[in-house]
Amino acid sequence: MNIQNSEKFYAQAQNFMPGGVNSPVRACRAVGRAPLFIDHAKGSKIYDVDGNEYIDYICSWGPNILGHANERVINAVTETCQRGLTFGACHSGEIELAKLIKKHFPSMEMLRLVNSGTEAVMSAIRAARGYTKRDKIVKFEGCYHGHSDGLLVKSGSGLLTNSIPDSAGVPKGYTDNTLLAKYNNKESVEKLFEEHGDDIACVIVEPCAANMGVVPPQEGFLRFLRDITLKYNSLLIFDEVITGFRLSIGGAQKYYNVKPDLTTLGKIVGGGMPLAVYGGKKEVMQCVAPLGSVYQAGTLSGNPVAVSAGIETLKILEENEAEIYTRLEKISLQLENAMQESGMNVNRVGSIMTVFFTNEKVKDYDTAKTADTARFAEYFRHMQDNGIYTAPSQFEAMFVSFAHTDEDIDKTINAIKSLE
Ligand code: PMP
């Protein structure tokens, strides 16, 4: 695969942006290749500046559940643009999107639109602390909740990929109230509650972890988190930035049938535009300004163009729910089966999956880290050379979309099976 033009752009970009990128994982440092510079994308395919075509399993890291540039979404956005890009004022689209979200996430009795997953999580935690009047939070090793100061402790995603244990620039005091537990390990959570129970505002969790690679919750783990937070009057926050509208139209909370107090959404809910959401119990959300004393605001929040992309995407998912989620499950299972037949160790839930290059069953951060990242890099390069675009990191998810055709799946299976 000739990627000369990408390499040229990459060399230029490094003069302007740290590592040549605007988000670290994109730099592809873990796999020894220049990042692809993208020209355009349509459906299941993405095209680089050298004219190469790839079947895309990054899907912009999750938003593109319908594939790239869905015609209805593009039309909705184009039409909205004609009426103005931003008003910084109220508009009826906000209500329409909120209604759609609440219909499928009934636990989100009241919500706020923001611009990124990072912002959604940061704001949800502030609301939880404001409501409970407690400072401590519990997060899990290997779960990523965006890059706000208090959450950059044993996070997954780019931090795991680039072996950054924490972040410089975060004063120690900012993470003093962040308690760490082990994913799928009830005892580690119990211990924290025994020691700090009355000070814990909330437990935040990826209900199916996807930022240390995909690590599903073990049977009963989410129910346990629900019970223990209720027992100690703490709040349970599901970070559904990845799982929302993906594991099911009602996200992981519907898929696993466990109801959190607060939820964060991102990616799919914005239909490919910068939009995210936090929300939950009315009594908690009523603490947010201007009703309450928890401050949170945003110049571009509820941006009409982003909102219209979100509305159209959710409408398509709603109108074709059975067809879309049945197909996603079917083709994702085909990929999983092919990987297993090739002796790969794969974790999958619905349309997100990760191949781990380790013999251990991956159930938490420690087991994820046993993966052989050099072997992963070989796998990545093999797939790229066969026209398959996957995440350039062992610790990310592969995303399947409704736009992936049977032919795409066959081609991908052939690439998987030809890995030596
Ligand atoms: N939470 C989760 C579970 C995520 O996967 C991500 C990003 N991948 C975030 C939060 C942060 O979202 P953003 O990148 O939009 O800030």
Image: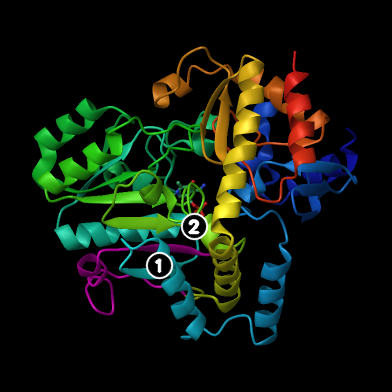
State the colouring used for the structure image: rainbow
User: In the structure shown, which secondary structural element does the residue marked by tag 2 occupy?
Assistant: loop
Please tell me how crowded label 2 is: few (under 14), some (14-19), or many (20+) other residues with Cα within 10 Å. Answer: many
| Residue 134 versus residue 288 in the image, above or below | above
Pick the residue in front: 18 or 410. Answer: 410
Queried whether the magenta region covers residue 187, the answer comes back as no
Pick the residue in front: 12 or 192. Answer: 192
Queried whether the magenta region covers residue 282, the answer comes back as yes
Note whether ligand 1 is within 8 Å of mark 2: yes
Magenta span of residues = 274-298
Q: Which mark is residue 266?
A: 2
Quarter-of-image position of residue 85: bottom right
Between discs 2 and 1, the one toward the N terminus: 1
User: In the structure shown, which secondary structural element does the residue marked by tag 1 occupy?
Assistant: helix
Question: As drawn, is 234 to the left or to the right of 236?
Answer: left
Q: Is the magenta stretch mostly helix, strand or loop?
A: loop
Which residue is drawn at the image coordinates 30% and 47% (left, top)? 258
User: What whole-number distance in Å separates the C-alpha atoms at marks 2 and 1?
Assistant: 17 Å
Quarter-of-image position of residue 410: top right
Pick the residue in front: 204 or 136. Answer: 204
The answer to whether residue 234 is seen in the rendering is yes
Which residue is drawn at the image coordinates 73% and 61% (left, top)? 69
Q: Residue 138 carries which label?
A: none
Q: Name the residue under label 1.
A: 103
x, y percentage for residue 98? 43, 72
x, y percentage for residue 273? 60, 64
